[in-house]
């Protein structure tokens, strides 16, 4: 439940543009890039004031999170580049069991602001939510857990679960935690950046203290902080308050062009993680989201930026592993040969493969999927994502229409279900 007014649509865009001082030319360029994006504009007043308070380059970098920057698309992306719609079951698409021990619960479709590079653009509709609907989702999750004892943790996500009222939120997380198999609920949110004071609700703070008394149970907040400025001011103070109540924090920023690909910004972000007790565990590459492809960096570019930042960070600050996520799972980008500045081969290893039933046999026949195995593949300039890489190496991949190509000697195209919604909002 947002404590901050939410700006939406054309009126909201115009208010933000005026408050942050866009010139007429900048305003026009932003309007045009927003028009090409499939994510509706939405931003809290708190975040608008944060942007207005920043100096360059942070002002433009943070603005780029809620307004897509002008720029040409270097390729055509796709909807659902993580395979959420294929992993969701027909009768309960809000439950996704892609990795053996983790159940994802897509709790709500809403967020308090919209990140324009969000890979869930086709799922987030800003339709609102109802307590009854969330109650049924949790009930379905509990039933699923009963039948799948190998699942020991729940990724509680959306949208942003913090967008709902504390009573419903607390009741839902508590019910999940009380399931005997569940050791941890991962609470994924970006509200600490967009509307930090929402977390100063005594009902929520008391619940976090209650969790400390539950033996063998934990709630870990997975914060979608992308920029160091998001950990300043009120956000920093709220992070301290949550830490005092024993809440564990993790950070998993996507490295996105124009937002945090600058090495100084990446260094500052990871240093502020340490300052505020946020453990950096992933850095992810931008997924090839349709309509906002200008956010993309090639895999060698993002590797070089992260490597340059790591050279300036202490051991505790550079723990985050660089991953590229895909329908098939998560791949760690280990390095390039002969060297990243002149890449001819890429070295990948599975961070985690999706369960075998979600992997095409043509992939299982060609590459190992254990976390300890590495893949060394040919690398060509202009590789923005796993689909480009696998296409160039004759491996199964998806095209921009979300069709799976098996890339066998006589290539087979497997039709995938057309996404139910092609335009969010
Ligand atoms: S808060 Fe998360 S789910 Fe919502 S738009 Fe941003 S990245 Fe997507």
Image (cartoon, helix red, strand yellow):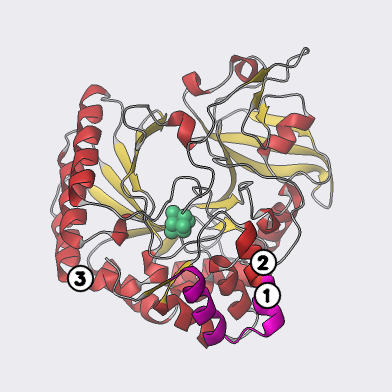
Q: Secondary structure at mark 3?
A: loop
Which residue is depicted at the point 77% across and 52% down?
74
Q: Position of residue 102 (x, y in %)?
A: 36, 35
**Residue denoted by label 3:** 201
Indicate whether 383 appears above or below 150: below
- Residue 302, position as x, y percentages in the image: 69, 54
Q: Which residues are magenta?
A: 8-29
Q: On the rendered image, what quadrant is the N terminus found in? A: bottom left
Residue 319 x/y as whole percent: 53, 55
At mark 2, the secondary structure is: helix
Q: Residue furthest front?
A: 10
Labels 1 and 3: the sequence-earlier one: 1
Q: In the structure shown, which secondary structural element does the residue marked by tag 1 occupy?
A: helix
**Residue contact at pointers 2 and 3, CB within 8 angstroms:** no
Badges 1 and 3: C-beta atoms under 8 Å apart? no
Mark 1 lies on residue? 28
Pick the front one: 90 or 225: 90
Mark 1 Cα shell of 10 Å, populated few (<14), some (14-19), many (≥20): some
Q: Which circle, 2 or 3, is nearer the viewer?
A: 2
Q: Which mark is residue 245?
A: none
Q: Which residue is mark 2?
A: 32
Report the Cα–Cα distance between label 2 and label 1. 6 Å
């Amino acid at each position: 439940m947002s404590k901050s007014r939410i700006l939406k649509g054309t009126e909201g865009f115009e208010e933000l543009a005026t408050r942050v001082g866009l010139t007429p030319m900048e305003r026009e360029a932003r309007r045009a890039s927003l028009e090409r994006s499939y994510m509706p504009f939405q931003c809290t007043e708190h975040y608008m004031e944060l942007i207005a308070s920043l100096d360059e380059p942070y002002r433009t970098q943070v603005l780029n999170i809620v307004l897509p920057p002008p720029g040409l698309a270097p390729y055509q992306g796709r909807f659902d580049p993580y395979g959420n719609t294929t992993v969701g079951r027909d009768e309960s698409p809000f439950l996704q069991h892609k990795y053996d021990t983790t159940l994802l619960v897509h709790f709500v479709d809403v967020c308090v602001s919209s990140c324009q590079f969000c890979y869930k653009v086709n799922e987030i509709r800003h339709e609102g939510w109802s307590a009854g609907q969330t109650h049924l989702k949790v009930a379905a999750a509990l039933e699923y857990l009963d039948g799948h004892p190998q699942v020991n943790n729940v990724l509680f996500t959306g949208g942003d679960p913090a967008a709902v009222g504390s009573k419903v939120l607390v009741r839902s997380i508590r019910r999940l935690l009380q399931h005997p198999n569940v050791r941890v609920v991962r609470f994924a949110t970006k509200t600490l950046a967009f509307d930090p004071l929402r977390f100063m609700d005594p009902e929520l703070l008391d619940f976090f203290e209650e969790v400390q008394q539950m033996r063998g149970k934990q709630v870990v907040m997975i914060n979608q902080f992308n920029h160091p400025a998001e950990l300043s001011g009120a956000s920093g103070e709220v992070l301290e308050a949550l830490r005092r109540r024993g809440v564990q924090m993790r950070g998993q920023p996507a490295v996105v062009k124009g937002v945090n690909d600058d090495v100084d910004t990446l260094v500052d972000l990871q240093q502020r993680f340490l300052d505020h007790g946020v453990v950096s565990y992933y850095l992810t590459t931008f997924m090839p989201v349709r309509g906002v492809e200008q956010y993309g960096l090639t895999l060698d570019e993002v590797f070089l930026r992260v490597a340059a930042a790591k050279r300036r960070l202490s051991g505790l600050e550079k723990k985050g592993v660089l991953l590229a996520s895909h329908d098939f799972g998560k791949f760690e980008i280990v390095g390039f040969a002969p060297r990243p500045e002149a890449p001819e081969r890429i070295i990948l290893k599975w961070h985690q493969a999706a369960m075998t039933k979600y992997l095409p046999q043509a992939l299982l026949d060609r590459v190992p999927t254990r976390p300890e195995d590495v893949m060394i593949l040919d690398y060509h300039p202009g590789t923005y994502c796993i689909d480009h890489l696998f296409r160039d190496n004759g491996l199964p991949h998806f095209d921009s229409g979300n069709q799976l190509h098996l890339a066998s000697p006589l290539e087979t195209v497997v039709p995938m279900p057309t996404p139910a919604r092609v335009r969010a909002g």
